[in-house]
């Protein structure tokens, strides 16, 4: 659709700039303390007033209005109080999904097929089926289940039944019914914080401490030298080094590796990028070893990097076996295409709700808006605009903007500071000039604005950064 | 509130009886096949038309109207298209929760405190804090995390920090950072189907086959002789036998047991009941062994057994350390009371969304309606009425109604048949006379109607059962 400013179309009253009414946030502090009596609110940055939030701006209870480039940890797709989503939220379909939540596996509603088809309209290339879950961690664990079912079914014959020994031993959580199998993931990866997803996560100790874990292997994810254009040869060697680690783990790990799980860009772990060749190499290794490839698009998906799904840039053949989603889609689950990734019997991939049709309906509505305005391409354009400005800023303030990452990846941009303290001070200083911005890894800053973040918002962001950085 | 029939109050147009328009369900079959192309629909009983469902009746696309005593696997609390919940679904608060889903741990909305307080108004006795999740499995795994955090913090000192060795080893999924610890659960228990919850689940092989699992111990849950009143002495011994197994496992298990997880009534596993003395014994054992007690009220909670939470009948002192909920509450999570069950540091019990305020708002609304009409007590009354009729029926058809269970537990009633085939035939025959009814364990039938199932509905259920059973 040929609209100059989609944000102006959606949000005629979007603020023109941030409002800093209070940097001491007394009302937020009071509300956090009060909430904390019965809900863990120790991680709260501030208490938001969502009724006053609008488009790219989030309001708090102290009257501040922040330009939000963190967007609920990368999960608000189309701005606060988006009118198209409000209309959808008021629809009979949504109201029914809220008040008559079905057990989708047993009693699907007559509208489920349409809901699923709407989501599939924006599925990754080559994927035509889905299974639905409730969060990114849940999506990944459901994908692990599909991988393990597939792996054992391949050994047994897809339609072969379980042996009596398997049936008996599984009730003791013992092999052969409960086999020792692994998912391979990468150092610095983040895949969620339940027990199996947490076993695959490897970005920060705080996510994992004190929790029992499966002893699953971790390979190394490429650590490139920047700027990329000056280090092509070294980075190519880095790809090969990391792929060889994966090959070696397949040979040497104490239990069979049934699947490889990887983010197209390691997000929580620091916005670590890798080349299409690296991912093509991973695809080949999984094929050679009879394992499945899971792309975790929880943070990178839904237009955030300038294409609908970040891995579509890698031209993987065949496409990934499973692609997990959540966050910006507001729903969660995985896409797949191979009919044998469907479990061989009913009731294997099953639970009471099997997803949430209210959130799935919203995902379909979000996909529709993205297509209508071509928002992934627009995010790419504004990202190019923003990257150039940030690059110039990084040359002016190199100490505070190291390893600028995310060129040609829309607004999915990050950089590092010299320490965690410096990074945290920067985030806090940005808040004091009216920008809500988030970190990743120990020392980095990540931009994760909505898909309706435009050049005018980029200008405000850069201006605020200049204000903070020039004060250092 | 003094209303004779709450269902008549909510549903003036509720059908007076089931309508059986088609027992071959051609439209459902066609819709299931079509849906099956991109969504696993092999477990579908029929395709529902939720727009035509009303109160205790669920409509399907073939024009059938079933009295629903299964209620979305025990999860519809107040009937289909409940007007009070529809009103709530249309509220600004709900619409905002749908379109502006916050990362609750970082950016709670100004309405979160009220939402949490509304849920806590119907918390189990002695519980005054909650943490929110997304499903029963998720709720249990979040509770496991809290248990493991607590267990290690007790050893280390609640406010003591992690050692460098813990921080280093956890990134390899190795001890001491990732310790070997266990949750003890019971044979025939059901606690969900993710990897840790699945490791605690022990009711059917199909839930667990081909999945790696933690090697956690299973004790035996009492298997009582019926009728209970004639077997008091034997059943008391059975309690003691099972408690001794738990004590022995605490002494002998290869890794420390940090928590005991138990359902007040084992539901999916066959509606297996146990005495207050058994649960009091479990409470004592956990206290003696420095472990926590988790009551899984996912299926038994929210009024289903004639009290708000089934374990409140057991008079546990101190109350359970964690109580997990989901299903009828439409939201999920756990209640707790001990300030030290709150993790010792921020960001330990954390994830992107930390629950779903839309579903939490609904839980608060459901709680309010239950209090307004005293629906738990009413469920108890109609349960007594129904149980008497079923007891009479079981004497007439003893082969098809063995071990009738659930006296004085409202409509939370079950019985067994002589085989899985006989049970499945019964369920199918009931559908053909207009009743949607579910099974549990291998050979049992479970009743799980809504909280607005009344005597008039009980009469229709019993009449339909008589019709089916008299044809055998």
Image: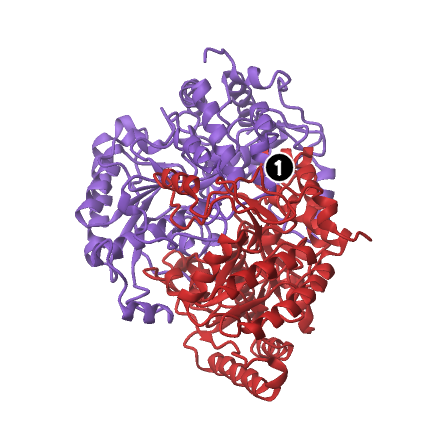
Chain colours: A purple, B red
Q: Residue B344: which quarter of the image?
A: bottom right
- The image shows residue A102 at horizontal and vertical percentages of 53, 46
Whether residue B111 is situated above or below residue B310 in the rendered picture? above
Q: Residue B340: which quarter of the image?
A: bottom right
Q: Residue B312: which quarter of the image?
A: bottom right
- The image shows residue B210 at horizontal and vertical percentages of 32, 60
Q: Residue at x 33, y 35 (%)?
A: A128
Res A73 visible: yes
Q: Chain of mark 1?
A: B
- The image shows residue B120 at horizontal and vertical percentages of 70, 54
User: Quick one: B24 or B343, which is closer to the camera?
Assistant: B24
Whether residue B30 is situated above or below residue B386 in the rendered picture? above
- Mark 1 burial class by Cα count in 10 Å: few <14, some 14-19, many 20+: many
User: Quick one: B372 or A411, which is closer to the camera?
Assistant: B372
Q: Left or right? Give the position of A270 relative to A55.
A: left
- The image shows residue B364 at horizontal and vertical percentages of 69, 48
Kindly give the residue lying farthest to the left in the view shown: A288
Q: Residue at x 64, y 76 (%)?
A: B276
Kindly give the residue lying farthest to the front in the view shown: B471
Dot 1: element: helix
User: Quick one: A298 or A143, which is closer to the camera?
Assistant: A143
Which residue lies under the disc numbered 1? B97
User: Quick one: A350 or A233, which is closer to the camera?
Assistant: A350
Res B454 visible: no
């Amino acid at each position: 659709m040929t609209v100059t400013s989609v944000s102006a179309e959606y949000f005629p009253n979007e603020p023109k700039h941030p409002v800093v009414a209070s940097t001491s946030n007394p009302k937020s502090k009071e509300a956090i303390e009060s909430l904390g009596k019965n809900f863990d609110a120790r991680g709260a940055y501030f208490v938001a007033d969502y009724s006053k939030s609008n488009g790219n701006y989030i309001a708090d209870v102290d009257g501040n209005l922040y330009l939000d480039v963190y967007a609920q940890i990368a999960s608000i797709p189309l701005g606060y109080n988006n009118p198209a989503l409000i209309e959808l939220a008021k629809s009979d379909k949504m109201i029914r999904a809220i008040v008559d939540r079905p057990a989708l596996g047993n009693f699907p509603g007559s509208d489920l097929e349409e809901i699923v088809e709407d989501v599939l309209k924006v599925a990754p290339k080559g994927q035509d089926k889905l299974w639905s879950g409730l969060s990114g961690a849940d999506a990944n664990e459901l994908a692990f289940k599909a991988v393990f079912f597939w792996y054992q079914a391949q050994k047994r014959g897809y339609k072969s039944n379980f042996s009596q020994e398997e049936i008996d031993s599984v009730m003791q959580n013992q092999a052969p019914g409960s086999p020792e199998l692994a998912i391979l993931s990468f150092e610095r990866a983040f895949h969620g914080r339940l027990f199996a997803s947490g076993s695959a996560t490897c970005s920060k100790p705080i996510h994992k401490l004190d929790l029992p874990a499966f002893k699953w292997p971790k390979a190394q994810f490429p650590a490139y030298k920047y700027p990329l254009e000056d280090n092509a040869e070294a980075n190519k060697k880095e790809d090969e080094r990391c792929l060889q680690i994966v090959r070696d783990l397949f040979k040497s790990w104490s239990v069979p590796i049934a699947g490889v799980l990887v983010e197209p860009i390691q997000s929580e772990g620091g916005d670590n990028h890798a080349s299409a060749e690296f991912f093509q190499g991973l695809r080949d290794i999984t094929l050679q070893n009879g394992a499945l490839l899971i792309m975790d698009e929880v943070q990178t998906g839904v237009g955030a990097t300038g294409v609908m799904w970040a891995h579509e840039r890698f031209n993987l053949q065949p496409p990934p076996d499973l692609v997990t989603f959540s966050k910006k889609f507001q729903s969660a689950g995985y896409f797949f295409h191979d009919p044998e990734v469907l479990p061989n019997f009913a009731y294997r991939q099953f639970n009471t709700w099997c997803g949430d049709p209210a959130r799935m309906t919203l995902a379909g509505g979000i996909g529709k808006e993205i297509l209508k305005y071509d928002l992934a391409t627009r995010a790419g354009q504004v990202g190019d605009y923003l990257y150039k400005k940030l690059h110039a800023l990084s040359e002016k303030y190199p100490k505070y903007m190291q390893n600028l990452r995310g060129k040609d990846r829309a607004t999915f941009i990050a950089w590092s500071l010299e320490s965690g303290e410096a990074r945290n001070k920067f985030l806090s200083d940005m808040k004091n000039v009216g920008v809500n911005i988030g970190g990743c890894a120990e020392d980095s800053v990540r931009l994760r604005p909505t898909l309706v973040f435009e050049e005018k918002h980029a200008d405000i962001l850069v201006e605020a950064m200049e204000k903070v950085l020039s004060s250092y």
